[in-house]
Image (cartoon, helix red, strand yellow):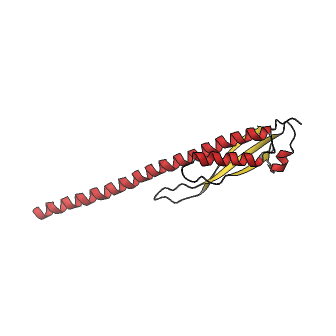
Amino acid sequence: MNSYSHCGKEDNRAQASVEALLVLMLLALLVFGGVELSRGVAVRQALDSGCGAAVRALSLDPGQWSFAGNLIQQSVQQNVMGAGPVVSVQVYDSANTPRSSAWLSGSPFGTVFILEASAPFQADIPFLPNSPMSIRVRHWGIVERYP
């Protein structure tokens, strides 16, 4: 009878170990998922802030395309832990047609434009497959430069 009760205690210890391992795996998913979610929100906020400032700069002087791109990139670099992603910037007209920086530079007073900034993002969460995505923000602007 003693040997039977002894095996039962070992079985309970093994079961407790397996349950603890499962709980720790779930806890790791929650912790790392929360960290990665906050990192994604930080990238989105930095893009939004930088894109808003860049639209304002381009509204006043549409020829400042490189300044606007650098402004967005610096905003992301300052607000993200570690090395920030490389940001891409695209301008669109009011009909949502992609345009060039030269189009924006030659646009007259009152021209409506949309500035889109995007950055790649990949969440690193243990036990889950990594799927790269792109975070995008868009801001509207109006050329306010007088002829």
Question: In the displayed structure, does residue 18 sit left or right of residue 40?
Answer: left
On the question of residue 51 being in view, the answer is yes
Q: Position of residue 147 (x, y in %)?
A: 89, 37
Task: Name, please, the residue furthest toward the bottom.
Answer: 3
Task: Name, please, the residue furthest toward the left.
Answer: 1
- x 78%, y 47%: residue: 92
Question: In the displayed structure, does residue 129 sit left or right of residue 2?
Answer: right
Q: Position of residue 63 (x, y in %)?
A: 81, 45
Question: In the displayed structure, does residue 49 sit left or right of residue 96?
Answer: left
State which quarter of the image contains the N terminus: bottom left
Q: Position of residue 79 (x, y in %)?
A: 58, 45
- x 74%, y 38%: residue: 56
On the question of residue 1 being in view, the answer is no
Give the total of numbered labels.
Answer: 0
- x 54%, y 49%: residue: 81
- x 72%, y 50%: residue: 89
Q: Where is residue 19 in the image (x, y as percent from the top left)?
A: 32, 55
